[in-house]
Amino acid sequence: MTEASIPQRIIIGCDHAAYRLKETLKTALQKQGIAVTDVGTYSEAAMDYPETGRAVAQKISSGDFDRGILICGTGLGMSMVANKYPHVRAALCNDLFSAAMSRRHNNANILVMGGRVIGDGLALEILKAWLETPFEGGRHQRRLDRFDTI
């Protein structure tokens, strides 16, 4: 098993449905000393989530950030947008087991959650599990290496 490496910088984005949850997660990350780059949205005014999903996914894909967080109403739309980018492994996690496994076996680099699906307390627990769970590597790395050939 590889050592857990909590990122020092995270890029985060959301749509209008998840604005309040994004603010809660951002505050929690900052309290842990993690620098957060917020690419919006910055209110509950209706907006088109693909723009925010693209902003986060591009920065992960290019290697500017190691990890990111995306949140929309269900998490489905953000997942679909983010996973179109090379080197992005966005995982929709609305439970603790999925959050841990997305890191352990899939080395997920974007955590996606549904702001209308889960509450703040569970979202904070999911974030903690996702941040603290290391990637196991080994046979899982061999499988991930195949992603770039697709």
Image: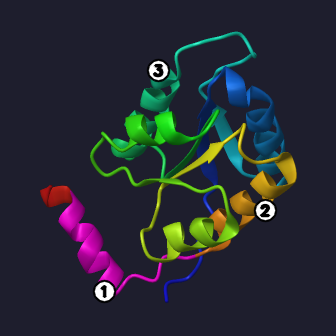
What's the residue at 83%, 40% (across, down)?
24
Q: Which residues are magenta?
A: 134-147
| Residue 75 picture quarter | top right
Q: Which of the two discs, 3 and 2, labels the residue nearer the N terminus? A: 3
Disc 2: which residue? 125
Q: How busy is the neighbourhood of tag 1: few (under 14 within 10 Å), some, or many (20 plus)?
A: few
Q: Which of the two discs, 2 and 1, labels the residue nearer the N terminus? A: 2
Element under disc 1: helix
Question: Are dots 2 and 1 in contact, CB under 8 Å?
Answer: no
Per the picture, the main secondary structure of the magenta-coloured stretch is helix
What's the residue at 19%, 57% (across, down)?
148
Q: Which mark is residue 139?
A: 1
What's the residue at 46%, 42% (across, down)?
79
Element under disc 2: helix
Asked if residue 113 is positioned above or below residue 71 in the image, the reply reads below
Asked if residue 107 is positioned above or below residue 7 in the image, the reply reads below
Q: Position of residue 89 (x, y in %)?
A: 40, 55
> Which quadrant, please, contains the C terminus?
bottom left
